[in-house]
Image: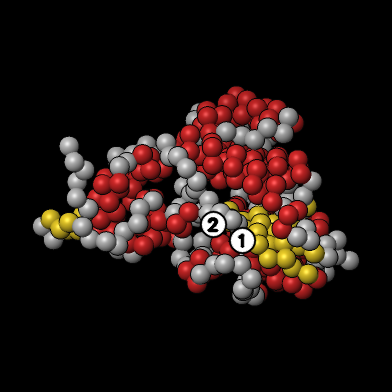
Amino acid sequence: MSHTEKAIHIYQRSVNGDVIFYTLLDFLVFYSIFSVYVRKYGIKVLGLAIMYNHLHVLASASERSKVEPLISSSTSYFVKAYNLDSGLNGPIFHRPFGSAVKLGDKNIRTAAGYLYNNHTNKKLCDKAEEIRWNFLAFAHNSHPFSKPIVRKEATHALRNALKEIDSNRRADRPLNYATLRRLYKPLGKEEKEQLTDYIITAYNAIDYEALESLYRSPEDMLYSFNANTFNEYDIDEDSEERSGDDRVYNRLAKQIMAMGHFASVKDILRLSDYERFRLAVELHAHTGVPYKQIGAFVHLKIGIVRHVYKGVEFPPPPEE
């Protein structure tokens, strides 16, 4: 029997469709903040999908006002931390967030299928449970993307990291960029994967029991997610947001890091408008990715040609 009769599908996109989540730390900082506020407000969350430039949340609630404190608090907290880390200022999420109330098991299942297939629809994975950032793989496995941690065999750095995560989780403190950067720095590649799974499991606030109660069994739920193409017409997404190809953002990130100029891909946000436009032209030349998606990646609207130099379109350089 279902534990949920009403739910609300929440859609929170970025300003101008710009990419927000560039790095592992971006995902984990938001996830820990969101999870802390889920528990603070006592909201039953059936699903969370973190995309590069938007979020989907499915919560057990009968109306928008029930979830507004959760979305407002978690995104506001994250924006402050994100701007401090990236050198930006101002809003990064579009206001207001979109929402649609779902009544009855069938409609809630459709919304769940859409949420958990968002990464699949954007060509980032083949099956819903194959990616971390919809958290489906964590329903019955604490380490789906890494080897189990044996503490007595772990390195000193990993054991210390686990202790610090435990301490923050017991206090229900969100994780911040400085802490995560410090904890990950001395770890090897395999240990980083282990710590990531550990953090997700420790902070996880998704009510999988309530989600699975909408289906005959957990296996039936996975089969439903992977056997259907779900649509959602009650939220304000355009066709590209519903089913574009987000693999281009992975290609752009790899190309930027291959240039050798940046310690982190997110460092591009500290460039001037002119420098980011020059970078956009270079990225287009190397990858062929359309300027619209490159513009979203570098936080720049590209469209109006203001200056042409040797056949290359640029805005005029800043005045000295």
Residue at the disc numbered 2: 13
Residue at the disc numbered 1: 98
The residue located at (61%, 61%) in the rendering is: 98
Q: Quadrant of residue 192?
A: top right
The residue located at (79%, 46%) in the rendering is: 42
The residue located at (54%, 37%) in the rendering is: 80
In the image, 62 versus 116, the foreground residue is 62
Give x and y (percent) for residue 99. 65, 62
Q: Quadrant of residue 3?
A: bottom right
Give x and y (percent) for residue 260. 30, 41
Q: Is residue 312 left or right of residue 19?
A: left
Give the tally of numbered discs: 2
Q: Which mark is residue 120?
A: none
Mark 1: amino acid? Gly
Q: Is residue 188 left or right of residue 277?
A: right
Mark 2: amino acid? Arg
The reply to whether the C-beta atoms of the residues labelled 2 and 1 are less than 8 Å apart is: yes
Give x and y (percent) for residue 188. 51, 35
Examine the rendered structure and indicate whether residue 279 appears above or below residue 102.
above
Does any portion of residue 194 appear in the rendered image?
no
The residue located at (75%, 40%) in the rendering is: 40
Q: CA distance from mark 2 to mark 1?
A: 8 Å
Give x and y (percent) for residue 237. 54, 67
Quadrant the C terminus occupies: top left
In the image, 306 versus 269, the foreground residue is 306
Examine the rendered structure and indicate whether residue 161 appears above or below residue 56.
above
Q: Is residue 313 left or right of residue 297?
A: left
Nearer the observer: mark 2 or 1; the answer is 1
Does any portion of residue 83 appear in the rendered image?
yes
Graded by Cα atoms within 10 Å as few (under 14), some (14 to 19) or many (20 or more), the crowding at tag 1 reads some
